[in-house]
Image (cartoon, rainbow, N blue to C red):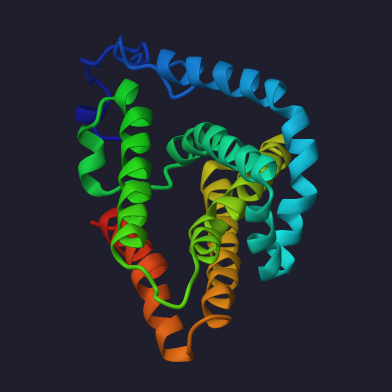
Amino acid sequence: MPEVFRQGVLEMSGTPLSLPAGMPSWQDCLTNRIAVVVTVLLGFCLLREYQRLVPALRDCLIRWKANVSLEHSMSQARSRNLLALSSALPFLLLADRFRFFRPAFWDAVPLPWSLPATAGVLLVFVLFRGLLYLLIRPARLGTEQRTAARKTLYNCFILLVLALLLTTMFLLGFHAGDTLVRRVLLGECALFWLVSLVRTGQIFAANCNSFATILYLCAFEILPFGILLFTGTL
């Protein structure tokens, strides 16, 4: 071996560098920890509501008329609204943890503000979709049918969140990587959204012609989701 390689001097420290202080992981973030505790408490408090309403929601996945029938019962509709609202928090936790919505500019969001920012995105989506239903009123749909069409997504959303939680616990129990978990969860989101789209389309089709049904679906459902997906890929 040449002599030049025998007498080298190590200038770097032999001790591995530690991560900079003040950079907690997702699990260590106080905002996320508080949200997880609130989610667990809400789940226990609303357990009886879930037990009472899940059979009706499952029927809504299978038959479009079940979504209309649910609006007939004020108690069921009220419970559905409560469960949909409470399901938003666990969904936001999963969406933030497994990076459902991560455009390039999201790297500038500090970790403690990532969950509130994700909640802001979901809120804007819900408000924009609700505004479309408020501004565009299909003439042939009664108030109840229009409400059922708008809230079919909420019926599917409640069951989606339950499925996401069960899937996450199953995959993490087998030590699946974050990339695999993210892909599976996003696949479930796409599946439930397609079911919601079909059931909503059937409600419109029962009262409107085929062309009007396609236009309403594009305006009420596909446009908001398209904007959300486009923004997420920036």
Res 200 → quadrant:
bottom right
- Among the 4 quarters of the image, the one containing residue 16: top left
The spot of residue 8 in percent (x, y) is 23, 21
Front-most of 95 and 154? 154
Q: Is residue 219 above or below residue 26?
A: below
Is residue 176 something that shows in the picture?
no
Would you place residue 76 above or below residue 195 in this image? above
- Number of on-image labels: 0
> Is 12 left, or right, of 98 in this rendering?
left
Q: What residue is rendered at 57% in x and 16% in y?
A: 37
Residue 191 in the figure: left or right of residue 137: right
Q: Position of residue 55 (x, y in %)?
A: 80, 50
Relative to 116, 41 lies left or right:
right
Q: Is residue 91 left or right of residue 104?
A: right
Looking at the picture, tell me which residue is in the foreground, 229 or 147: 147
Q: Residue at x 60, y 70 (%)?
A: 199
Task: Give the quarter of the figure containing the N terminus.
Answer: top left
Image coordinates of residue 56 in percent, x first then y, are 76, 52
Quadrant location, the C terminus: bottom left
Q: Nearer the viewer, residue 163 or 211?
A: 211
Identify the residue at image location x=34%, y=16%: 19
In percent of the image, x 52 and y 39: which residue is there? 91
Whether 67 is drawn above or below 106: the answer is below
Q: Is residue 168 visible?
A: yes
Against 100, is 45 above or below? Answer: above
